[in-house]
Amino acid sequence: MITRRCNDRCSKCGIWKTPEPDSERIQLKNFIKCLQSLHNNLYKVTITGGEPLLFMEDVLHFAEESRKLNVPMIVVTNGSLITEDFLVKYSNFEHILVVSLDTMEKSKWNEFRGRNHYDKVMSNILMARKILGDRLKIQSVFADETRDDIPKVKTFCDELGIQHTSQPYMDFGGVWHDANVSSLLDNDMVCAARKNICVYYNGDVVKCFDHLRIPLAREPLGNILKEDIISILSKKRTTEITKLMNTCNLPCKWLSCNVPEPQF
């Protein structure tokens, strides 16, 4: 997570309510140092926010470094800040761009996103499809509020040949409501969060984006401004949290970052 800042005011999310001041944002070089230290053991890197494209040049620089190190990368964006120039540059690195889209109804857009930029986002999606091809993906949040919307988003994606995924609503300070889909899923699935690490905008390192649900994992494992990332990941508490997550059955295990990669 490179920032808590966001240009949207989505009702599903509360991260935008607490943007970090400039003094708390670490420089991009610190994230790149982590990438260089861990790249041989990374299966992918995901850049999130807030809205990461508020720092578009940083995203492009990180994408370039990630490609040099042969680490696949994903950027998750609300789609409103996408430009043709960004897409052309980003396409050179052959990474994935994921755009969040929860409704096809223009009448619901302001309620869902808190901004009146439906036409802009939809136009940007079409432009991204043209430039990125199959490296553009759409992601939706399945909640009570979107039960009737997700099938329409899926149809839209199918018509354009865009891969669509949905994941259950998680409470990150928003006001939407859980659709209780986790009760219908395989509760014996092992949570892949044990393989993950999250580095925040201020350098704090945690094992899972939703770490506050686990008492042992609530406090950061360390901070990359003060310690080397390898030292942080070698701590006893890191190992203990990793073991705990092997049997974690919290609903956040259905987030895409926590679902195990398919085995072939």
Image (cartoon, helix red, strand yellow):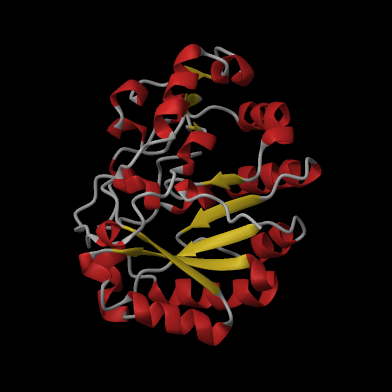
Q: How many marks?
A: 0
Question: Residue 188 location, x and y as percent?
Answer: 37, 49
Q: Is residue 79 left or right of residue 228?
A: left
* Residue 221 visible in the shown view: no
* Residue 211 visible in the shown view: yes
Question: Residue 205 location, x and y as percent?
Answer: 48, 25
Q: Is residue 162 left or right of residue 258?
A: right
What is the quadrant of the C terminus in the image? bottom right
Q: Nearer the viewer, residue 190 or 7?
A: 190
- Extreme-bottom residue of the structure: 159
Q: Nearer the viewer, residue 174 or 117?
A: 174
- Extreme-front residue of the structure: 188
Q: Is residue 15 above or below residue 98?
A: above
* Residue at 40% over, 43% down: 5
Using the rendered view, name the quadrant where residue 248 is placed.
top left
Q: Is residue 243 left or right of residue 127?
A: left
Using the rendered view, name the quadrant where residue 128 is placed.
bottom right
* Residue at 52% over, 49% down: 260
Q: Is residue 118 above or below residue 135?
A: below
- Extreme-right residue of the structure: 68
* Residue at 42% over, 24% down: 241
Q: Is residue 210 above or below residue 56?
A: above
Q: Is residue 180 left or right of residue 240?
A: left
Question: Residue 103 location, x and y as percent?
Answer: 34, 74
Using the rendered view, name the quadrant where residue 227 is placed.
top right
Question: Residue 94 location, x and y as percent?
Answer: 73, 59
Q: Is residue 254 above or below residue 203?
A: below
